[in-house]
Image (cartoon, rainbow, N blue to C red):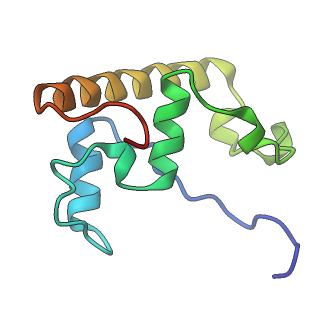
């Protein structure tokens, strides 16, 4: 609609491993033929933002959309759940950085 707001949520962060993320972008929908080797931050802008967040470099001005607890999925209302999921995501990002460094790929966002 016009100016109505969100009617649903689409998640990319319910993957438990780095390989699952790569496989999703390699096989699902509009498959990316190099997704198994590309850094995850180059696969989609959402992943680029999520990686920046995990690395502590997210610009919160980009997220100033007024989200409050009433606008979050119920899964994320629990602070302990959010922290656990964020730590898991940070480990996935650390694994990706290590893999890309072994391939001599730049780990600078946007590079």
The percent coordinates of residue 25 (x first, y second) are: 28, 59
Where is residue 66? Give x, y as percent: 87, 44
Quadrant (top left, top right, bottom left, bottom right) of the C terminus: top left
Q: Residue at x 35, y 21 (%)?
A: 91
Q: Quadrant of residue 76?
A: top right
- Identify the residue at the far bottom of this view: 1
Of 35 and 81, the residue lying toward us = 35
Which residue is located at x 49 percent, y 26 percent? 54
The image quarter containing residue 95 is top left
Residue 20 lies left or right of residue 111; in this view the side is: left
| Residue farthest along the left direction in this orientation | 103
**Residue 70 locus on image (x, y percent):** 85, 43
In terms of depth relative to the viewer, which is nearer, 11 or 102?
Answer: 102
The image shows residue 32 at horizontal and vertical percentages of 24, 66
Front one among 95 and 28: 95
Residue at 51% x, 51% y is 46
Instruction: Indicate the quadrant containing the N terminus: top left, top right, bottom left or bottom right.
Output: bottom right
Q: Residue at x 20, y 42 (%)?
A: 19
Q: Is residue 73 left or right of residue 46?
A: right
Horizontal side of 107 relative to 12 (left or right) equals left
């Amino acid at each position: 609609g016009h100016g109505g707001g969100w009617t649903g949520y689409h998640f990319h962060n319910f993957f438990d491993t780095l390989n699952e993320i790569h496989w999703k972008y390699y096989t699902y929908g509009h498959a990316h033929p190099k997704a198994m080797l590309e850094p995850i931050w180059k696969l989609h802008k959402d992943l680029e933002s999520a990686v920046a967040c995990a690395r502590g470099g997210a610009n919160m001005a980009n997220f100033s959309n007024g989200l409050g607890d009433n606008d979050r999925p119920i899964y994320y209302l629990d602070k302990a759940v959010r922290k656990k999921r964020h730590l898991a995501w940070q480990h996935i990002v650390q694994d990706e950085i290590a893999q890309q460094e072994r391939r001599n790929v730049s780990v600078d966002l946007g590079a």
